Image: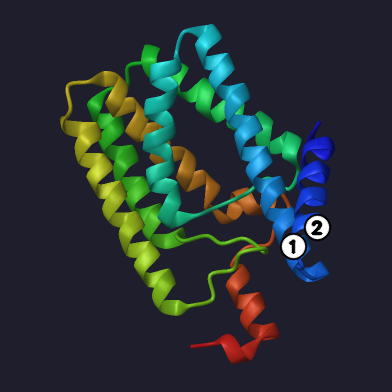
């Protein structure tokens, strides 16, 4: 199905444009990314509707992606791995958040650890998207830490157990996604900007 859709779109683009091969490869790569995101979301939305947790899934999806946006982190190397991990995170986490109760002192300790880890490890780039600009890395780190602090206030102060758990699980999962150990376990290179700058010193600023 994926090949049929992508090849069909690429055939249309080739017939109606004068793009060179390099540009066409970029477009194909982008279309593949869009296809994977859309197909993955359709599957996750369908499962959440079947399980009756659509609203919970949507809330967790927003909560998690807000903190992931500036801190980046791991990306699956295979589409099926991405799908499986996304189902576990965006179906499993909101389901657990809806039924579990965590004492406030455990949440407080966890938040403190997450703030420190976010300061230590964010932003965590990938080999395909190294964050080479030092100022950008500092900005992303600052935003990430501020968000975790704000989440911590929500976690501790809100009376809504589900929202509190969503924020807590979001910062826990994202701290795992940016941890050097997680990169090592999945055999992916860490601090990719360092390698990139060694190979391309002209980009160092």
Residue at 57%, 23% (x, y): give it.
44
The quarter of the picture where residue 18 lies is bottom right
Which residue occupies the foreground of this view, 36 or 158? Answer: 36
Which residue occupies the foreground of this view, 176 or 192? Answer: 192
Secondary structure at badge 1 equals loop
| Residue under pointer 2 | 14
CA–CA distance between discs 2 and 1?
6 Å
Residue at 46%, 47% (x, y): give it.
175
Query: Is disc 2 in contact with disc 1, using a CB cutoff of under 8 Å?
Result: yes
Whether residue 85 is visible, yes or no, is no
Establish if 146 lies above or below 167.
below
Residue sitting farthest toward the front = 16
Query: How many numbered discs?
Result: 2
Left or right of residue 53, residue 18 in this image:
right
Residue at 62%, 60% (x, y): give it.
126
Q: Position of residue 48 (x, y in %)?
A: 52, 15
Secondary structure at badge 2 equals helix
Q: Position of residue 78 (x, y in %)?
A: 76, 43
- Label disc, if present, on residue 46 of the rendered structure: none
Which residue occupies the foreground of this view, 14 or 163? Answer: 14
Whether residue 183 is visible, yes or no, is yes
Q: Position of residue 169 (x, y in %)?
A: 41, 32
Q: Position of residue 157 (x, y in %)?
A: 15, 31
Left or right of residue 105, residue 194 in this image:
right
The quarter of the picture where residue 64 lies is top left
Residue at 26%, 20% (x, y): give it.
161
| Residue under pointer 1 | 17
């Amino acid at each position: 199905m994926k090949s049929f859709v992508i090849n069909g779109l690429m055939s249309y683009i080739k017939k109606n444009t004068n793009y060179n091969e390099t540009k066409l490869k970029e477009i194909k790569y982008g279309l593949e990314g869009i296809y994977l995101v859309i197909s993955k979301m359709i599957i996750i939305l369908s499962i959440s509707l079947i399980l009756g947790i659509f609203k919970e899934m949507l809330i967790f999806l927003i909560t998690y992606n807000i903190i992931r946006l500036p801190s980046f982190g791991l990306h699956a190397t295979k589409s099926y791995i991405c799908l499986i991990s996304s189902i576990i995170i965006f179906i499993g986490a909101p389901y657990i958040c809806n039924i579990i109760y965590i004492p406030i002192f455990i949440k407080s300790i966890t938040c403190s650890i997450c703030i420190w880890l976010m300061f230590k490890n964010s932003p965590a780039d990938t080999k395909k998207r190294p964050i080479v600009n030092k100022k950008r890395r500092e900005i992303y780190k600052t935003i990430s830490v501020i968000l975790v602090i704000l989440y911590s206030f929500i976690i501790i102060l809100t009376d809504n157990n589900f929202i509190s758990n969503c924020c807590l699980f979001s910062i826990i999962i994202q701290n795992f996604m940016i941890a050097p150990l997680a990169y090592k376990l999945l055999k992916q290179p860490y601090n990719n900007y360092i390698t990139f700058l060694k190979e391309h010193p002209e980009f160092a600023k």
